[in-house]
Amino acid sequence: MLLVVDVGNTNIVLGLMEGFELRHQWRLTTRTYTTDEFGLAMLQLLALEGVDSATIEGAAIGCVVPSTLYAIQKGIRRYLGLECLVVGQGVKTGMPVRTDNPREVGADRIVNAVAAREAYGAPVLVVDFGTATTFDCVDSSGAYAGGVIAPGYQISAEALFTRTSKLPRVQVERPQRVVGTNTVHSMQSGLFWGYVGLVDGIAARCKVELGGEVPCVATGGLANLISGDSQEIDRVDDSLTLRGLRILWERNP
């Protein structure tokens, strides 16, 4: 089995892949861990699922929070005895990156693009609902063409609360009606339907620039919430990033 670790700004997602099938998945809050804290947390998660660590043959990491990377790498080395493939400069992706500065593109975005092209062909559009919401475009030649970065849903909700004196913090949920009859429902409506509009508007324009009939794949924490009312999202793929890490591990023996 392969241990795959997706380190985002909000969560660290760990998965165990057997081939390209996700057998187990866990989430930790992203923070600064010591080597031992991360290593012990990892062993406890494996033990809870009855997984023998000796069956894990390798590890791949995609990380957008550099301050966490050292402890995670060292924790995996110390407690599992494995060296990690870290997605970054020098890693073979099999995908040309046609941006002004390829080094600026986050590891998670390249991983998503590689996985989406492998599963759905090219061109393809990926929408990843993380701390920020990213739109990543793979063109008809199979190259990474660039994308869009927008404030995440939760960032938008927090900004509305912190930048106004009387509006409360509200739960992230789909309102039953667009027209709210109280402050909380009005805020939830503005956040939810405003975000659906943002996603559909940007996705539609990306599809035009990519050539029209382009499948749109959503992943990330809020993908299932938003996709049900989106006109542009065609499917939700919860394990897209983790499968992408598996693909890159195979390409970098």
Image (cartoon, rainbow, N blue to C red):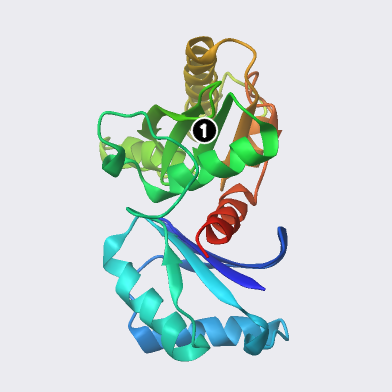
The vertical placement of 90 against 61, above or below, is above
Please identify the quarter of the rendering in which residue 102 is found: top left
Nearest the viewer among 133 and 194 is: 133
Q: Nearer the viewer, residue 114 or 195?
A: 114
Look at the numbered disc 1 and give the secondary structure of its residue: helix
| Amino acid at circle 1 | Gln
92, above or below 12, in the image: above
Instruction: Provide residue 49's location: percent of width, then percent of height.
Output: 71, 81
Q: Percent x, y for residue 2?
A: 62, 70
Q: Nearer the viewer, residue 86 or 133?
A: 86
Q: Is residue 176 above or below residue 29?
A: above
Count of all numbered marks drawn on residues in the image: 1
Judge left or right: residue 153 versus residue 118. Answer: left
Which quadrant of the figure contains the N terminus? bottom right
> Residue sitting at 52 percent across and 39 percent down?
113
Q: Position of residue 69 (x, y in %)?
A: 33, 69
Category of crowding for the residue at label 1, using alpha-carbon neighbours closer than 10 angstroms: few (below 14), some (14–19), many (at least 20): many
At x 62% / y 33%, what residue is drawn? 217
Does residue 45 appear in the picture of this structure?
A: yes
Left/right of residue 54 with respect to residue 153 in the rendered view: right
- Residue 174 seen from this side: no
* Residue displayed at 72% across by 63% down: 19
Q: Residue furthest front?
A: 253
**Which percent across, then down, holds residue 188?**
52, 33
Residue of label 1: 188
- Position of 137 with respect to 45 (left or right) is left
